[in-house]
Image (spheres, helix red, strand yellow):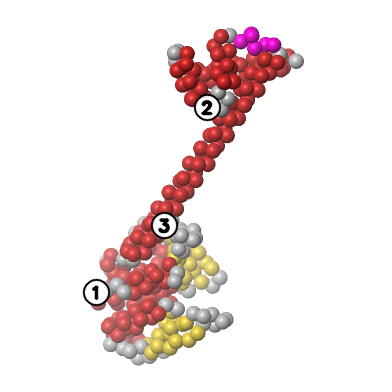
Amino acid sequence: MSFTSRTKDELSKLEFTNMENISELSAIIQSNAVITDKITLITENSSVARRIYTLIKKIFNINSKITIRKGYNYSKKLHYILEINQNVNSVLKTLGIQKEKPDTFIYADDDLVRAYFKGVFIMCGSINDPKTSRYHLEFNLTNNKYAEFISNLLNKYDLNSKVLIRENRYMVYIKEAEKISDFLRLIGAYNAVLYYEDIRIYRDHKNMTNRLNNCEQANVEKTIETANNQLRDIKFLEEKDCFVLLNEKEKEAATYRKKYPEASLVELSEIVSLETGVHISKSGLYHRFRKIKDFADKIRNKK
């Protein structure tokens, strides 16, 4: 079972007040129903189908018709088709459903908005499993104005949603991991939040470890390259019988570099300070090697 299906199963079992149930059912119908002389809803999730049936029964005391069919194109998934054939106008009025967005009483306070978001998600929402994919949550809608309404409502809670046209449909989506987690918390999917946060923290920790390892590797490679360049200059001066022309401090630095060819400047400065009893800083040691390099370059250029 996918993460989306598990989340919808969890949400379908939550209990709300009667007004919150009305907001939830309003979102379910407005987001994905076909409305003619009847109201038709289609879902592939059996828990969602049961939830819709229960809401219609609780609110309107109507037993909606349910048909189960196999999906097209050899799909093994079942489609649950629910139909409301009676009192359609009364149902739509009670649920505050209009052409482009619901009546304001449907989302008049935070609790009703949460219920409304829940209804939109279980009907046309999907969320990537953080374990296997990039972070992504979306709502697949058919109406541009309604998509803008949903996006604006989400952004009142600082969820940074955006609208994208996909063929003849409109996708409202959220990309940021923290915002997706906030949305799940907002609609009451707390088991999904715990799972999502565990995986997100693990992935963030793993990515940080990889970045640190890469950074450490880059530092090691840089240290080795620096030491090899210093050894190359020292060897060149020795071959040209110019090493003796260095002053005592430079000779000392060169001697310790030859003795500890893999040490970083920090490590080498600590070694020199410890063995000679005279403190030398990293920058002081760097300055000595810089003078050795300049002297070696001068000899090379003269040649």
Residue type at mark 2 is Ser
Element marked by disc 3: helix
x 32%, y 79%: residue:
95
Q: Nearer the viewer, mark 1 or mark 3?
A: 3
x 29%, y 77%: residue:
22
What quarter of the picture does the C terminus occupy?
Answer: top right
| Nearer the observer, 185 or 269 | 269
Pointer 2: what residue? 264
Residue type at mark 1 is Thr
- Disc 1 and disc 3: Cα gap in Å? 32 Å
| Nearer the observer, 46 or 140 | 46
Element marked by disc 2: loop
Q: Is residue 275 above or below residue 197?
A: above
Q: Nearer the viewer, mark 2 or mark 1?
A: 2
Tell me if 17 is positioned left or right of 285 in this view: left
Q: Is residue 137 above or below residue 59?
A: above
Chain part drawn in magenta: 241-246
Pointer 1: what residue? 17
Pointer 3: what residue? 199
Q: Which quadrant would residue 51 be assigned to in this image? A: bottom left
x 43%, y 83%: residue:
80
Q: Earlier in the sequence, mark 2 or mark 1?
A: 1
The answer to whether residue 139 is seen in the rendering is: no
Is the residue marked by circle 2 packed among few (<14), some (14-19), or many (20+) residues within 10 Å?
some
Q: Which quadrant would residue 260 be assigned to in this image? A: top right
Q: Horizontal and vertical percent for residue 67?
A: 43, 88
Q: Disc number at residue 239?
A: none
| Nearer the observer, 156 or 70 | 70
Q: In the displayed image of the protein, which residue is found farthest to the left?
A: 17
Tell me if 134 is positioned left or right of 64 in this view: right
Q: Horizontal and vertical percent for residue 232?
A: 65, 22
